[in-house]
Image (cartoon, helix red, strand yellow):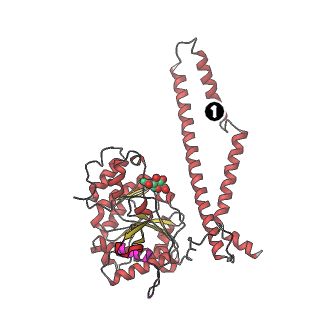
Amino acid sequence: MLVRRDKTKLFPGSRIAIAILVGILLGCICTILFPNGFFSSRSSSVHERLSKSTSKVGSVSCESPERITMLKTDFALISEKNAELRKQVRELTEKVRLAEQGSENARKQVLVLGSEIKAGPFGTVKSLRTNPTVVPDESVNPRLAKLLEKVAINKEVIVVLANSNVKQMLELQIASVKRVGVQNYLVVALDDSIENFCKSNEVAYYKRDPDKAVDTVGENGDNHAVSGLKFRVLREFLQLGYGVLLSDVDILFFQNPFSHLYRDSDVESMSDGHDNETAYGFNDVFDEPSMGWARYAHTMRIWVFNSGFFYLRPTLPSIDLLDRVADTLSKSEAWDQAVFNEQLFFPSHPGYTGLHASKRVMDMYEFMNSKTLFKTVRKNQELKKLKPVIIHLNYHPDKLERMQAVVEFYVNGKQDALDSFPDGSE
Ligand SMILES: *[C@@H]1O[C@H](CO)[C@@H](O)[C@H](O)[C@H]1NC(C)=O
């Protein structure tokens, strides 16, 4: 009995799913009982009016203008109601999907963390990739905790670090975020200029305590210095129990990214790869003819995870990752993206204990880098029609111009907006 009670506690998502399913079932029953809907008096009157007017077509040459206006109003009302219902269905579907995702992840955690340690039959064994989340600790930063209560949705938030060097790109990003209607978006303002900018644009922002030494990096730092800082800043968000979607400023949003996450891994990241192999991994055979019979050596390759756009679940491996990267960067001049990937992928070996974080690569066309866009997508009639979730102008130094062109292409429908740019930089 005890075991069973514990399990139901671990399945909060499934109760929500059941509640929503019951709602949908009731909806279906209502549809069967009242096929014309609860507002049938209104719609039947339209039917009558419509049939009356059509029956008159033969005898009367034209309708009175009032009647036509009335019919038009009725039609507009019904279309509006229809659109509203469709929107509700979409929202419900999304909620059901999220709840199912949550309960499925919880089920896997129970399977692995519970007492069921005997392996099941062939084909039924699934190892753990969805690690349990940490217990939120508000004491690490009560001010941030309060802010996140307001800004986060479902304990998730987009976090962007910015100083005034990148203000124009931030402006384009914020416009894209507002267009999509994403609410849980937070700017970590690294100087007063960005703070004021956020205030006047009504964007949620967070300013770190001035006594924290690392902040001088943020105020004066170039892109790479800020990149190192983000690993320290994110730690507190995770400790407070929030899932964080870190975004650089040279990124535009075209759909809500939270509807496109899997949430089954510690780290879910966009890729620097640009096709199936480079983005998702491949077996790269190295040829050394002098070895004769053993001339072919197989190597595992994947293009790096992009450390400018990744989602972290608030788990111990995620926090471990941030600490390892911040620690390495504090001791060397290394590139943060290289360190991020080395920590994620190098296995334990003599003298070194590797990080054991679970990883997922985001869909390369949904979370698209600018190499994929300019090298492939813009030249392919099918791929050109896809609507990405985000585009990251990571591969190009003329970021601002290309960001503007990407907005022209994906938002304003200007089909040739991307044509004038070369594939790479010149
Ligand atoms: C890439 O992988 C997807 C999914 O497996 C497949 O549908 C697609 O055809 C592949 N593309 C190429 C160019 O091989």
Residue 195 counted in the magenta span: no
> Toward which corner of the image does residue 323 lie, by quadrant?
bottom left
> Which of the two residues, 413 or 145, is positioned nearer the viewer here?
413
Disc 1 marks a residue whose amino acid type is: Arg
Return the residue found at the far top: 59
- Beta carbon at label 1 within 8 Å of ligand 1: no
Q: Position of residue 321 (x, y in %)?
A: 45, 77
Q: Position of residue 253 (x, y in %)?
A: 40, 56
Q: Position of residue 94 (x, y in %)?
A: 57, 54
Residue 337 counted in the magenta span: yes
Total numbered circles? 1
Q: Residue at x 69, y 37 (%)?
A: 35
Is the residue 320 above or below the residue 29 in the image? below
Label 1: how many Cα within 10 Å (few below 14, some 14–19, many 20+): some
Q: Residue at x 41, y 52 (%)?
A: 179
Q: Position of residue 358 (x, y in %)?
A: 51, 72
> Which of the two residues, 39 or 242, is positioned nearer the viewer here?
242
Residue labelled with disc 1: 42
Question: Is residue 181 something that shows in the picture?
Answer: no
Return the residue found at the far bottom: 351
Question: Is residue 220 something that shows in the picture?
Answer: yes
Q: In the image, is 361 to the left or to the right of 339?
A: right
Return the residue found at the far right: 1
Is the residue 46 above or below the residue 6 in the image? above
Task: Check the picture and name the quadrant holding the C terminus.
Answer: bottom left
Return the residue found at the far front: 292
**Range covered by the magenta-colored residues:** 336-351
Q: Main secondary structure of the magenta part?
A: helix
Q: Residue at x 78, y 74 (%)?
A: 1
Task: State the SS at label 1.
Answer: helix
